[in-house]
Image (cartoon, coloured by chain):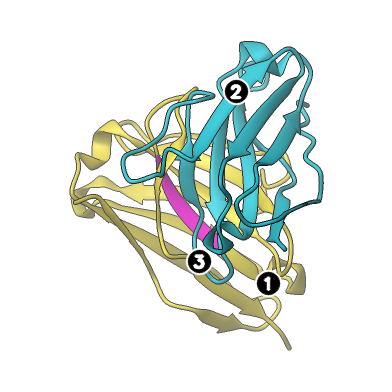
Amino acid sequence: EVQLVQSGAEVKKPGESLKISCKASGYSFTTYWIGWVRQMPGKGLEWMGIIYSGDSDTRYSPSFQGQVTISADKSISTAYLQWSSLKASDTAMYYCARYSSSVMPFDYWGQGTLVTVSS
Amino acid sequence: SYVLTQPPSVSVAPGKTARITCGGNNIGIKSVHWYQQKPGQAPVLVIYYDSDRPSGIPERFSGSNSGNTATLTISRVEAGDEADYYCQVWDSSSDHVVFGGGTKLTVL
């Protein structure tokens, strides 16, 4: 059974760093992409970027380029999303999702990680 | 960049047919995917490649795509279909994933 299990909710202060995770199981991690999607409170889905753990090829949405870093550790089938300096506007739910190639859909999703940034 | 436009809301009575549109320039030549998101839950894929249904998705869900509009159709709408629906494509010109703004389906 394909599963994406994300790390738990986080409460951080502005300026702090954060790394959240998405652990995959039930399929070959290195033959699929993992994407990250932001959902701000009461708002829609926003694509942040994707990573192919087979060769660490990473693509970012222009809206998030330079704001976050996407990485993966194929030895433990885990993808990451990290911030070096959080802002209050980073408060959102973050989802990871499996993606096989450009025209394919996100077919499996993690349960989401709620990040709250507040002083 | 490529833009997908969805109506913010659609309302339908139980048992009737709901149609949710997704507009984009020449979207008919792209593969469109649709996701359902219920409150407090992660999105779920309900239609992929314009009109294919993943296993476990009721036949009441169908899709079409032509010209500048893709459409998600939900027949014999039930109360449990009340959710937000998002369309999504891959924009080959920018190599980016694009989501529509989402449509809230209300079952009257």
Q: What kind of residue is marked 2? A: Ser
Q: Residue at x 25, y 51 (%)?
A: A77
Chain letter for the residue marked with disc 1 in the picture:
A
Residue A85, relative to residue B12: is it above or below?
below
Question: In terms of secondary structure, where does tag 1 sit?
Answer: loop
Q: Which mark is residue B41?
A: 3
Foreground pick, B92 / A82? B92
Q: Residue at x 49, y 60 (%)?
A: B42
Q: Which residue was labeled with disc 1? A: A91
Residue A7 in the image: state x and y as whole percent.
Answer: 39, 71
Residue A78 in the image: state x and y as whole percent.
Answer: 31, 54
Q: Which residues are magenta?
A: A94-98
For marks 3 and 1, give the CA distance: 17 Å
Residue B67, relative to residue B47: is it above or below?
above
Res. A83 in view: no
Foreground pick, A14 / A117? A117
Q: Residue at x 81, y 43 (%)?
A: B7
Chain rendered yellow: A
Question: In terms of secondary structure, where does tag 3 sit?
Answer: loop
User: Can you tell which of label 3 and label 1 is closer to the viewer?
Assistant: 3
